[in-house]
Image (spheres, rainbow, N blue to C red):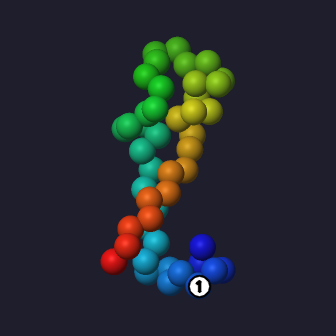
């Protein structure tokens, strides 16, 4: 998005894989771990 003209100071990244997993499991499979390794984008109009 920076290469498309969005200023760096308007972009924020946060990691939630361990604190807010999409898949709750004790002994996760490879597929379940993959679902928790993700990037989500939220577009907010100011």
Callout 1: SS = loop
x, y (%) of residue 44? 38, 68
Q: Tell me the residue at 43%/77% (across/down).
A: 10
Nearest the viewer among 46 and 29 is 46
Nearest the viewer among 32 and 46 is 46
x, y (%) of residue 8? 50, 80
Q: Tell me the residue at 62%/33% (across/down).
A: 34
- Where is mark 1, residue-wise? 5
Task: Find residue 37 and report its image quarter.
Answer: top right
Task: Find residue 31 and report its image quarter.
Answer: top right
x, y (%) of residue 27? 52, 14
Decide: is 32 above or below 17.
above
Q: Residue furthest front?
A: 45
Q: Quadrant of the C terminus?
A: bottom left
Local crowd size for mark 1, using a 10 Å CA cut-off: few (<14), some (14–19), many (≥20): few
Decide: is 46 above or below 18.
below
Decide: is 46 above or below 39.
below
């Amino acid at each position: 998005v920076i290469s498309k003209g969005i200023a760096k100071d308007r972009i924020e990244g946060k990691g939630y894989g361990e604190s807010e997993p999409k898949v709750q499991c004790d002994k996760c499979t490879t597929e379940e771990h993959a679902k928790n390794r993700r990037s989500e984008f939220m577009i907010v109009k100011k």
